[in-house]
């Protein structure tokens, strides 16, 4: 069973994704509303196989979080989930190590396909 952490500033989306992924047979080992919570989860020894990462937060830019994750935990695969679909941002996300980008709004079939594409 693959371990997943969801990072998004929307508590509704975090809960929805956790429930849906657990129902689909994945093990969601944590959820965070930003990098501070995420890195506390890591410090507690919970390292996921896959991280679902939003890119826009009220006080930080998700690409900076992505860079830090890839520098410290290069084995973690990252699927960026964002409502913004701009070519320059998509390029920056992929150049900084994300495996793929899923644009909001998406349905669970889209998410599961994206996760399978990453080859978990």
Image (spheres, grey):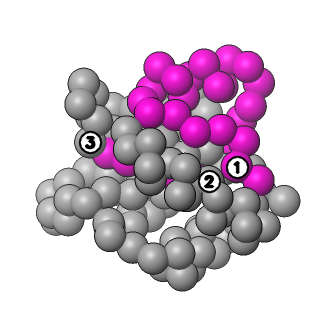
Element type where label 2 sits in the image: helix
Q: How crowded is mark 1: few (under 14 residues within 10 Å), some or many (20 or more)?
A: many
Say which residue label 1 marks.
28
On the rendered structure, is 114 left or right of 62?
right
- Would you say 9 lies left or right of 57 here? right
Is 93 or 2 nearer to us in this picture?
A: 2
For residue 18, the mark is: 2
Q: Is residue 30 magenta?
A: yes
Q: Nearer the viewer, mark 2 or mark 3?
A: 2
As displayed, is residue 67 above or below residue 112? Answer: above
Instruction: Tell me the SS state at disc 3.
Output: loop
User: Residue 60, position in %: x, y?
Assistant: 27, 28
State the SS at label 1: strand
Residue at left 66%, top 25%? 42
| In this rendering, position of residue 56 left or right of residue 71 | left
Where is residue 66? Give x, y as percent.
42, 38
CA distance separating discs 1 and 3? 21 Å
**Which mark sits nearer the N-terminus, 1 or 3?**
1
Q: Which residue is drawn at 53% across and 58% down?
A: 16
Give neighbour class at mark 3: few <14, some 14-19, many 20+ (Cα, 10 Å). Answer: some
The residue wearing badge 3 is: 56
The Cα atoms of the two marked residues, 2 and 3, are separated by 19 Å
Residue 91 position within the rendered picture, expressed as x and y whole percent measured from the top left: 25, 59
Percent x, y of residue 32: 52, 34
Q: Cβ–Cβ below 8 Å for labels 2 and 1? A: yes
Residue 100 placement: quadrant? bottom left
Distance, label 2 to label 1, CA atoms, is 6 Å
Q: Which residues lie in the magenta part?
A: 27-55
């Amino acid at each position: 069973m693959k371990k997943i952490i969801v990072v998004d500033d929307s508590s509704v989306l975090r809960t929805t994704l956790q429930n849906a992924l657990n129902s689909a047979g994945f093990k969601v080992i944590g959820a965070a509303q930003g990098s501070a919570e995420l890195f506390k989860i890591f410090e507690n020894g919970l390292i996921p196989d896959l991280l679902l990462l939003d890119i826009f937060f009220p006080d930080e830019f998700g690409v900076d979080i992505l860079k830090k994750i890839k520098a410290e935990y290069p084995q973690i695969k990252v699927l960026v989930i964002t409502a913004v679909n701009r070519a320059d941002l998509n390029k920056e996300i992929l150049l900084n190590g994300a495996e793929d980008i899923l644009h909001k709004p998406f349905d669970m079939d889209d998410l599961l396909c994206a996760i399978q594409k990453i080859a978990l």
